[in-house]
Amino acid sequence: MGAIVKGLVTALGCGLLFGVGLCISGMTDPANIIAFLDVSGKWSPNLAGVMLGAIAVHATWLRWTARSSTQIATPSVPANKRIDGALLGGAALFGVGWGISGYCPGPALVALGSGAPGVLVFVAAMAAGMVLSEGKSPWTIRDSGKRSTSLP
C-alpha cells in the first residue's frame, strides 16, 4: 500500500471514529450544545464530559508520541502569535454562531447527513465564511514543505 493511500485510509478511519464518537455522545444534536451553554436554565454537563474525554485522549497521544523514537507529524504552529482584532473578531463570531446554532464545524459536518434545514444553513454559512476569509484564493491547499512519516 502506497504512502498516499495509507495516509488517506488513516484519515478516513480517524474521521469515521470522530463522527461515530460525536453521534454516540449526542453532540450532533444542537439541543445538547445549547443545554450546555444554558448555565442559568437546565444546564447539561454532557459536552463537558465529551471535552474531558477528548482532552484525556489527546494528552495520552502527546505523551506517547513524545516518548516514541519514530518521527510523527506534529501540527504546525502559526507564525503570527499576536492577539489582534481579526483573531478576537473571528473568535467572537465563532462563539456567537456556535451559541445561536448549537453547531460547531465538526458536529455540523457529521449532522449534515441528517439533511436537517438548520445544519444545511449552518454549513452553507460556514463555507461562505471560509471563502470570504481566504479572499481571492479560496479552497487552496498550501504545501508547508514539512513531510510526515507514517506510523510504525
Image (spheres, helix red, strand yellow):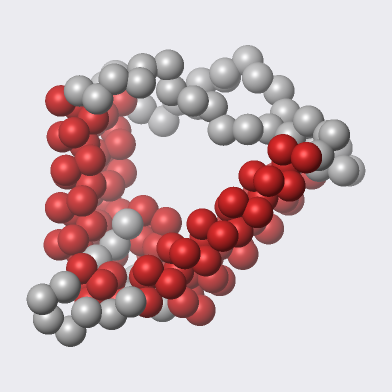
Q: How many marks?
A: 0
Q: Position of residue 103 (x, y in %)?
A: 29, 62
Where, by quadrant of the figure, is residue 116 drawn?
A: bottom left
Residue visible at 17% across and 44% down? 93
- In what quadrant of the picture does the N terminus appear? top right
Nearest the camera: 82 or 17? 82
Q: Position of residue 70 (x, y in %)?
A: 83, 34
Where, by quadrant of the figure, is residue 107 drawn?
A: bottom left
Nearest the camera: 121 or 110? 110
| Residue 82, visible in the rendered structure | yes
Q: Is residue 99 left or right of residue 119?
A: left
| Residue 12, visible in the rendered structure | no
- The answer to whether 9 is drawn above or below residue 50 in the figure is above
Residue visible at 37% across and 77% down? 46
Residue visible at 49% across and 25% down? 77
Where, by quadrant of the figure, is residue 129 drawn?
A: top left
Residue visible at 16% across and 73% down? 38
Nearest the camera: 82 or 127? 82
Residue furthest left in the image = 40
Q: Position of residue 137 (x, y in %)?
A: 35, 21
Q: Is residue 61 left or right of residue 77?
A: right
Q: Position of residue 33 (x, y in %)?
A: 28, 70
- The answer to whether 21 is drawn above or below residue 89 in the figure is below
Q: Is residue 5 left or right of residue 1?
A: left
Residue furthest bottom in the image = 42
- The answer to whether 34 is drawn above or below residue 98 in the figure is below
- In what quadrant of the picture does the C terminus appear? top right
Q: Is residue 14 left or right of residue 148?
A: left
